[in-house]
Amino acid sequence: MIEIVRVENAKWCGDALAEQFKFRYRHFVAKEQWDVPSYKGMEYDQFDTPAAVYLVWRDIAGVVRGMVRLLPTICPYMLDTLWPDMAPVPPVQPSPSVWEITRFGVERDLSLTLRKKISAELILACIEFSVAYDIHTYLFLTAWGVLKRIVPAAGVEANIQKRTTLPSGHDVASAVVPVSRELLDKARAKLGLHYNVIDDSIGGQKHAA
């Protein structure tokens, strides 16, 4: 199951909040060599505010193996603040129903089967969260491979906006993704996962998805 972790419920999630920062260091800094801030083996940036929501996939030992960060566009978010050249055209207006997806990552040192399972459940978790919180649009800013392979594999159509190769060699892209209850049903059918992937036992979801 995937946990919804944020500032206000972190005390009920054990060490999940700290562990997702450690996962990000392992994945984005140590493995992918992203030039992003880190401290004591934890990766972070200025968008890790009380507005951030983390969808965290942990194994039975409690180790974070995959995650994604969600940010409401009514607060500062990455695409608008740091990557305006990658923003959608025409612009998407900030709204409580428009959120950004960043920091999508899955542990590379796992079997292909498990990596696919984690990726699929993270995509489903994003859609489940959107249904529960009345979100109708996601703005993606992520590695090109996520939008090229992982998102379509879940039956989700992403409207690709911009794609660029950074001086570091990383290939990144932005996209607009409409989400709905109908999309959730379609993605579940495509992936063959007919169950809620989000663990709402710790007050995660506002209402059932």
Image (spheres, rainbow, N blue to C red):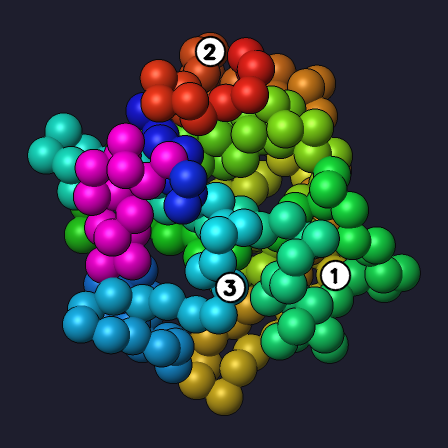
Q: Residue furthest bottom?
A: 167
CA gap, disc 3 and disc 1? 22 Å
Residue 46 position (above or below residue 91): below
Residue 39 position (above or below residue 2): below
**One can see residue 113 in this view:** no
Secondary structure under tag 3 reads loop
Tell me residue 193's x, y (percent).
Answer: 44, 16
Query: Mark 3 belongs to which amino acid?
Result: Phe
Give the class, few, some or many, for how many residues have Cα within 10 Å of label 1's Cα (few <14, many ≥20).
some
Query: Mark 1 belongs to which amino acid?
Result: Gln
- Viewport quadrant of the C terminus: top right
Q: Name the residue under label 3.
A: 47
- Relative to the observer, which residue lies in front, 27 or 21? 21
Q: Name the residue under label 2.
A: 194
Secondary structure under tag 1 reads strand
* Magenta-highlighted residues: 9-23
The residue shown at (55%, 42%) is: 151
When asked about the image quadrant of residue 65, the answer is top left
Tell me residue 198's x, y (percent).
Answer: 41, 24
Q: Name the residue under label 1.
A: 161
Q: Which of marks 2 and 1 is nearer the N terminus?
A: 1
**One can see residue 97 in this view:** yes
- Viewport quadrant of the N terminus: top left
Secondary structure under tag 2 reads loop
Q: Does the magenta stretch include residue 11?
A: yes
Q: Which of marks 3 and 1 is nearer the N terminus?
A: 3
When asked about the image quadrant of residue 64, the answer is top left
Image marks 2 and 1: residues in contact by CB distance under 8 Å: no
Query: Mark 2 belongs to which amino acid?
Result: His
The residue shown at (72%, 74%) is: 84
CA gap, disc 2 and disc 1? 31 Å
- Relative to the observer, which residue lies in front, 120 or 28? 28
